Image: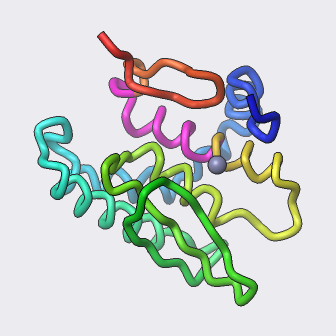
């Protein structure tokens, strides 16, 4: 396991430590608003409809991000990743075969971090941001996830 990634214990501890500042309220409201028109019924959606929903989710999150306004664009590719150019243009790339809410929140969590923090800290903060928000806004789904190392996956039956 790459030690860039925090352990489950570290993520959960950090989520509790930062409570109640975390997850930030603006994001909870934005996600709940997004849910009313873009979420249901998630597991019955076609993959292309999930992609549209994820694009809308990113747009809702961006609108909420007043603390760290960024030039941030989103596109579909072959894996979930956040990149930043020297000119401070942030790009989130989503895995077109796996339009995942938790992954979108995670990469967005990277995009809003301040400059100058270590890669490990960056990773920890993105995990805490995304998992904290997911736990808050999708409690039933959160309960159905299981940890695989530092990652959360849907339980396979
Ligand atoms: Zn990450």
Residue occupying the point 50% across, 59% down: 26
- On screen, residue 151 versus residue 7, left or right, reads left
In magenta segment, residue 110: no
Q: Which residues are magenta?
A: 128-141
Q: Quadrant of the C terminus?
A: top left
Residue nearer the viewer, 86 or 34: 86
Q: Is residue 80 above or below residue 66?
A: above
- On screen, residue 57 versus residue 15, left or right, reads left
Percent x, y of residue 150 = 65, 29
Residue nearer the viewer, 86 or 72: 86
Residue occupying the point 59% across, 63% down: 82
Q: Is residue 124 above or below residue 53?
A: above
Q: Main secondary structure of the magenta part?
A: helix
Percent x, y of residue 56 = 30, 66
Snapshot colouring? rainbow
Percent x, y of residue 78 = 42, 57
- On screen, residue 42 versus residue 97, left or right, reads left
- On screen, residue 95 versus residue 9, left or right, reads left
Residue occupying the point 38% across, 17% down: 155
């Amino acid at each position: 396991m790459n030690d860039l990634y925090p352990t489950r214990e570290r993520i959960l501890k950090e989520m509790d430590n930062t409570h109640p500042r975390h997850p930030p309220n603006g994001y909870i409201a934005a996600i709940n608003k997004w849910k009313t028109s873009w979420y249901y019924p998630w597991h019955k959606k076609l993959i292309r409809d999930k992609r549209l929903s994820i694009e809308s989710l990113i747009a809702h999150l961006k609108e909420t991000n007043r603390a760290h306004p960024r030039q941030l664009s989103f596109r579909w590719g072959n894996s979930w990743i956040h990149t930043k150019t020297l000119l401070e243009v942030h790009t989130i790339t989503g895995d077109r075969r796996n339009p995942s809410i938790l992954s979108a929140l995670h990469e967005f969590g990277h995009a809003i971090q301040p400059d100058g923090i270590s890669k490990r800290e960056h990773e920890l903060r993105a995990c805490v941001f995304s998992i904290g928000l997911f736990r808050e806004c999708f409690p039933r789904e959160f309960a159905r996830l299981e940890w695989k190392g530092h990652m959360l996956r849907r339980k396979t039956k």
